Amino acid sequence: MPTKSDIFASDLNASLRSRTAVIWITTSEEARVERYIAEACRAASYVPVFWDCAKGVTGLDGRRVPLVDSPDLTECLEAIAKASTGSERRVWVLRDLNKWLEGPVGVQTCRQLRNLARTLPGTPREGAQAIIVLTPSSEVPADLASASVIAWPSPDREEIAEILDNLAKAYSLDLNGSRDAAIDAAIGLSGDEAASFYAKSLVVNKRIDPAAVAKEKKRVISKSGVLEWLDGLPGGLASVGGLDGIKGWLTKRAIAFTPEARAYGLPTPKGILLAGISGCGKSLTPKALATEWRCPLVRFDFGALKGKYVGQSEGNLRKAINTIDSLGPCIVLVDEIEKALAGATQGAADGGVSADALGTFLGWMNDRTSQAFVVATANDITSIVNNAPELLRKGRFDELFFVDLPNVAERAQVVFATLQNFKRNPNDVDLGAIADVTEGFTGAELASLVPEAMFVAFADGTRELTTDDLIAAARTVVPLSKTAKDKIASMRNWAAEKARPATTPLAIDTAARPARVLDL
């Protein structure tokens, strides 16, 4: 099965054979992509040569090629024009060129490239010349708008597998059934990073340890600044009290990632939007889901995308999306999405950067074919309804859930789960009594009762906490349902007909006493 890079190399081959004069390839993996470029050139009957500002013109092996006397770019471009009248077909791969196109000095270089883009397609086939600009920058100057642009993909699973197998063969390694796990651990890395981390694990652990590779990957992705790697919630969905409607929906969708589901034709779930009251488990759910589905969890931070240079924000966004697409099955958290997209819907104070980011993000949400599952949260759904309703259109998210204040049964569940998280026995307290006195509490407010009661119990002779301690802690809280009463009422009115409840009606109807629902 061909890899993504094989497919792109085939497209590059077709572009060269069709006499495309200037091709702009965006990648940060110069060495890996150059090998594919060389293969595409040979398949199209071209000889590849490589220019950079340090060595001048060289072959793929780094040895000087006597076509230009110095590393000067102007001389190189003049040599390309002269070579078009010769008898050898060449592809000139220009590294570092984006730096030579900036400012007033770049005017002459742009003009030379534009002239070559006009003249090279018409030269005799036996002397055909083509130019490939190889750069990490995706910002193509307007003067080179005619250039064919290729954003080279990160290594897919097949390429990572090839890197691992070559390393295993070179060192006579027996992967002992850990091959798939080792490949999964490196998905999302560049080819050089994957090879480096495999080798490091081999040196340190005397074997290729998937956990060690995954740890290195976490550092790389976090270092990028545009994505944040988050740890899953121990215990999975069972650690989140209530929200049985969301849990049931997610449990059914988990099977869509299996090979059997793909063979059956089940579509891959795209994601959900969790709207509702703050502190009721919206941000906790994706962390629990990552553990439940055994997937990486990354936070997509729109604020971190913005750069101080023109084009930097768009480049950061594309980098984040490409990284997510290369991760395979993963959970992507977009927290408080209404704030992240505020700049896109409130004028053009940032020159339209946020609006462009919103358009790119929405396009990706609609058209992506990756296995990323997006969980977006919103505390103020009306802001999205009024300013960015296109985000709610079917096709972006599979479902929109409204997360309300926990009912009496869910309040007991939240306290139950929190006590377990703090390694306390829930059977030692009266969950029903606590649920009765905490009407209107958010999940976060309920969870805060346990550590508050533990402080009291510890100060009182390091005894175990009691029901009275928890009830006393509850009486010190002024719940959000009182301070934001009107806002909550407005959200409930909107959600009554436009969103799916995070708690099923059955659970609400049978919630007279918590013990009867929880089966504790």
Image (cartoon, grey):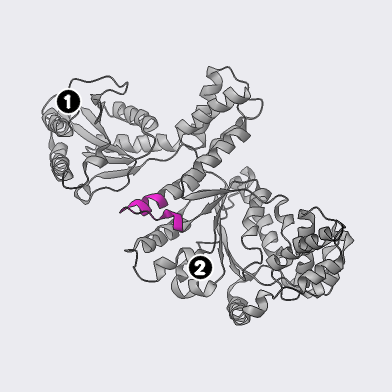
Question: Looking at the picture, how far across and down is residue 333, in whole percent?
Answer: 55, 56
Q: Which residues are magenta?
A: 303-317
The residue beneath circle 2 is: 392
Residue 334 highlighted magenta (yes or no): no
Question: Looking at the picture, how far across and down is residue 47, in whole percent?
Answer: 25, 25
Where residue 53 sits, quadrant-wise, is top left
The residue beneath circle 1 is: 70
Depth-wise, is mark 2 or mark 1 nearer the camera?
A: 1
From what the image shows, is residue 20 above or below residue 288?
Answer: above
Q: Is residue 193 left or right of residue 399?
A: left
Query: At label 2, which amino acid type do we have?
Result: Leu
SS type, badge 2? helix
Where residue 91 sits, quadrant-wise, is top left
Question: Looking at the picture, how far across and down is residue 216, in whole percent?
Answer: 55, 36
Query: At label 1, which amino acid type do we have?
Result: Ser
Residue 511 at least partly seen: no
- First of labels 2, 1 by sequence position: 1
Is most of the magenta stretch helix, strand or loop? helix
Question: Looking at the picture, how far across and down is residue 457, in whole percent?
Answer: 83, 61
